[in-house]
Image (tube, helix red, strand yellow):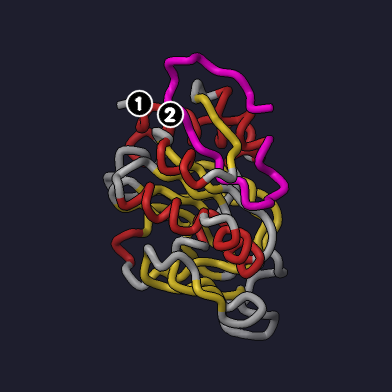
Amino acid sequence: MTPSASSSAPRIAVVDYGSGNLRSVARALARSGLTPEVTADPGAVRAADGVVLPGVGAFADAMAHLAEKGLDQAVRDAIESGRPYLGLCLGLQVLFEQSDEHGVTPGLGLLSGRVERFPEPGQPDAPPRVPHIGWNTVRFSGDHPLTRRLPAEDYYYFVHAYRPVPRDTAIVAGVVEYGAPFTAAVAVDNVFAVQFHPEKSQSSGRRLLDAFAAWITS
């Protein structure tokens, strides 16, 4: 069952492609005053006031499930129509052209660039361990409506072994240090997406989802 919120609150399609953390994301969105609907219906995604694509797991599996249900094109259509989009973890990664996880897999192709694994120990800029699990500080930048509502730095929870590498650095809205700086958030027009998990990030995650709610209602 979808968490309840005010009937006048913006309706948010939480895209259901088999990810395991959908309900926790929906509950977090409801606490920020939105009306989330966990859905695998492409029509519901296209009709929503905004779209949230969360995710845990493998890039190739996510893309296969999205394509199987017709959700890949529905997400593209919603973004191209100007609806606000928030991507969380895999919801950030699938925006790019491809990922190197388990071989090369095409993504949605809405952002130029790729997703690659962190360097292994002994390689240049290798982090202490892979995957990157735990809390880390994100430094935000840029003039997107959502970043304007966030602190310049905040602390978020990460779980991932692969990182986004945008070709266009102008879309980078947040950076984190792990072995070397990497992109933790991207922002362009009606798209905002993050590599971390706001739904697991306590008060800092609530601030980000509150900022998303304020952005979508403005």
Asked if disc 2 and disc 1 are in contact, CB closer than 8 Å, the reply is: yes
Is label 1 in a helix, a strand or a loop? helix
Q: Is residue 57 left or right of residue 67?
A: right
Bin the neighbour count of mark 2 within 10 Å (Cα to Cα): few under 14, some 14-19, many 20 and up: many
Q: Amino acid at mark 1?
A: Thr
* Residue under label 1: 217
Q: Is residue 36 magenta?
A: no
The location of residue 173, given as percent across then percent down, is 38, 53
The location of residue 216, given as percent across then percent down, is 37, 31
The location of residue 199, given as percent across then percent down, is 62, 38
Q: Residue at x 38, y 27 (%)?
A: 214
* Residue under label 2: 213
Q: On screen, 160 above or below 138?
A: below
Query: How many numbered badges does the structure rendering display?
Result: 2
Q: Main secondary structure of the magenta part?
A: loop
Q: Amino acid at mark 2?
A: Ala
Q: Residue at x 68, y 51 (%)?
A: 19
Residue bounds of the magenta highlight: 1-23
